């Protein structure tokens, strides 16, 4: 999301918790066609582009993203090109072979209750189906709880994919930022899960450094796949600071009420 929007929300959210919205993959590498079902979403408000996020196609017509991406949006569209930056024409709405408009936008009904990180789920229906060989898949209920005993291992734990900033800097040096609309991938490790009063059972903290890469503005809603599978363990949700450094927070999807909500939505769209 826009850095100015991040700054505003951070002030509000700090009154509720220690979290601030995350919005691109940092210290990562171009994804190419590694995850063609991950797309760049630009959300509109009253017909004008307002912010960008990332998301995962989990059926031919339904995209999984974050609630803070869908909240307040009135429309938008998605691209699945790995390099949206070089699509012609350059002015919005720039067209590509897989550009599709939204026909419906859904935000978790409890999103507005308390801190946004507690119910950070959004879904988008596309106006036409996108047929692919495979799609992102959902975890099973409680699947991530088993990772508690694996915290700190050196093996790759997650694969984060998104179209956000590649580098973020404080406002005074924001001119140094890199915000190419290119699908990037990084491989962060699990840092915290099931910590009472902090991550709780609703989120996890993943590494965000030069060694493993991480997420930043514009990656919000993007997938954090379990290992190198197609299982979307969590969507990118929040950051600890405006420089996208240290850690990144992700919203877990392995809770039965969430899985029921998503599956019901897919079945009805």
Image (spheres, grey):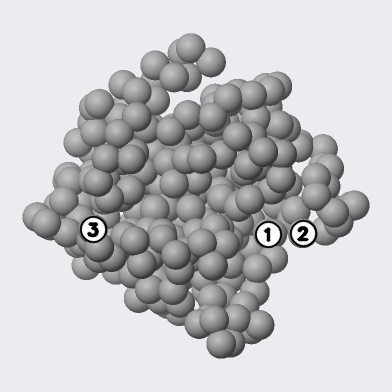
Residue 256 in view, yes or no? yes
Give SS at disc 1.
loop
Question: How far apart, in angstroms, are the residues tagged by discs 1 and 2?
Answer: 6 Å
- Quadrant of the image containing the N terminus: bottom right
Residue drawn at (50%, 45%) of the image: 69
Near-viewer residue (224 or 171): 171
Residue drawn at (76%, 37%) of the image: 99
Image quarter of residue 178: bottom right
Looking at the picture, how far across and down is residue 2, in whole percent? 57, 62
For marks 2 and 3, the one nearer the N-term is 3
Give SS at disc 2.
helix
Above or below, 211 against 103 in this view is below
Residue drawn at (42%, 41%) of the image: 67
For marks 3 and 1, the one nearer the N-term is 3
Question: How far apart, in angstroms, are the residues tagged by discs 2 and 3?
Answer: 36 Å
Q: Which residue is disc 3 drawn over? A: 16
Q: Which residue is disc 1 drawn over? A: 182
Q: Which residue is disc 2 drawn over? A: 85
Above or below, 157 against 222 in this view is below
Give SS at disc 3.
loop
Looking at the picture, how far across and down is residue 131, in whole percent? 67, 25
Q: Is residue 59 left or right of residue 93?
A: left
Residue 233 in view, yes or no? no
Within 10 angstroms of label 3, few (less than 14), some, or many (20 or more) residues?
Answer: few
Question: In the current view of this chain or complex, which residue is farthest to the bottom?
Answer: 172
Image quarter of residue 214: bottom left
Image quarter of residue 141: top left
């Amino acid at each position: 999301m826009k850095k100015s929007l991040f700054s505003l929300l951070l002030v509000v959210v700090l009154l509720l918790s220690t979290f601030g919205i995350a919005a691109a993959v940092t210290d990562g590498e171009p994804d190419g066609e590694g995850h063609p079902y991950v797309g760049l979403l630009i959300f509109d408000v009253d017909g004008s582009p307002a912010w960008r996020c990332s998301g995962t196609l989990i059926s031919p017509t339904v995209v999984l993203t974050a609630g803070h991406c869908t909240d307040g949006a009135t429309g938008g569209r998605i691209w699945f090109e790995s390099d949206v930056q070089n699509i012609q024409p350059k002015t919005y709405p720039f067209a590509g072979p897989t550009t599709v408009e939204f026909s419906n936008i859904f935000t978790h009904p409890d999103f507005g209750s308390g801190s946004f990180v507690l119910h950070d789920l959004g879904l988008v229906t596309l106006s036409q189906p996108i047929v692919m060989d495979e799609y992102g898949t959902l975890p099973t209920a409680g699947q991530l709880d088993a990772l508690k005993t694996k915290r700190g291992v050196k093996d790759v734990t997650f694969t984060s994919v998104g179209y956000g900033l590649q580098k973020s800097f404080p406002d005074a040096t924001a001119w140094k930022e890199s915000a190419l609309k290119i699908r990037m991938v990084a491989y962060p490790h699990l840092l915290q899960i099931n910590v009472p009063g902090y991550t709780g059972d609703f989120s996890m903290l993943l590494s965000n450094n030069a060694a493993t890469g991480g997420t930043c503005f514009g990656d919000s809603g993007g997938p954090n796949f379990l290992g190198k599978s197609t299982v979307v363990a969590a969507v990118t949700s929040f950051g600890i600071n405006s420089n996208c450094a240290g850690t990144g927070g992700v919203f877990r999807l392995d809770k039965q009420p969430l899985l029921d909500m998503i599956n019901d939505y897919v079945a009805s769209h």
